[in-house]
Amino acid sequence: MNETRLVQRCRLGNREAWDEFCENYYPVISFVVSWPKWRFMPDEREDAIQDAMTEVIKALDQFEMACSLKTFVHKISVNACIDRLRNKTTLKRRTNRLQVPLDTIGDDHSGESVSIASSPDMNQEAMLLAKERISFIHKALVKLEEHCKELITLRYLIELSFVEIAEKTGLKKNTLVVQMKRCMMRLFKMIEGEI
């Protein structure tokens, strides 16, 4: 198969060329989308394949034969999967969330402004209970040593991954996981009044 000729024919809108293109490169896209690291559910995979195929078709005009067509399709498919994950994460963070400032809850007015997400669909009793829990958490966080405050803030308020936190703090990932576990155990004990 002559890749240059196939791309030229596809660019001209030749139906047989597109059929040949899909027959040869659909498996590449499907292979990339099926990687376990994406954690796509089975019903998401077909949508992800369609997204990737759409991106490949759009990008085909910019293909300059600097690499093989298979490598090009592979790269575009990986990028499409990454974009899909980013969009999914962004939507998950935004859906049904309301920011509640912690500094307005409880007695401590240290000037630090921290917020958490809660559902706007809660009834008044649930909102009061959530505010009470937030107050306990805020008071416990204030008492935690600075290192633990920083780790918990980076992970749960700023929502960085363990890899990102490890890069930011200079800790090894395994060390970070152990320290985070200890900090969270200490926080839970404080909230329960054991410390």
Image: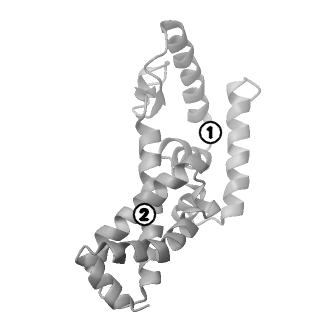
Residue positioned 42% across, 42% down in the render: 91
Image mark count: 2
Q: Is residue 85 visible?
A: no
Residue 130 image point, x, y percent: 55, 18
In the image, residue 24 sits, relative to residue 67, either above or below, namely: above
Q: Name the residue under label 1.
A: 144
Instruction: In this rendered view, identify the residue nearer to me: 82 or 35.
Output: 35
16 displayed left or right of 34 = left
Residue positioned 58% across, 34% down in the render: 141
Classed neighbour count for the residue bearing mark 1: other residues with Cα under 10 Å, few (<14), some (14–19), many (≥20): some
Image quadrant in which the C terminus is located? top right
In the image, residue 165 sits, relative to residue 111, either above or below, namely: below
Residue 162 image point, x, y percent: 60, 57
Q: Name the residue under label 2.
A: 52
Question: For numbered disc 2, what is the local secondary structure?
Answer: helix
159 displayed left or right of 177 = left
Residue positioned 29% across, 87% down in the render: 64
Q: Which residue lies furthest to the top in this view?
A: 125
159 displayed left or right of 12 = right
Alpha carbons under labels 1 and 2: distance apart: 46 Å
Question: For numbered disc 1, what is the local secondary structure?
Answer: loop
Image quadrant in which the N terminus is located? bottom left
In the image, residue 83 sits, relative to residue 44, either above or below, namely: below
| Amino acid at dot 1 | Leu
Classed neighbour count for the residue bearing mark 2: other residues with Cα under 10 Å, few (<14), some (14–19), many (≥20): many
The numbered dot on residue 156 is: none
Residue 114 image point, x, y percent: 44, 34
Instruction: In this rendered view, identify the residue nearer to me: 91 or 118.
Output: 91
Residue 61 image point, x, y percent: 25, 77
Residue positioned 42% across, 63% down in the render: 52
Write down the quadrant of residue 191 in the picture: top right
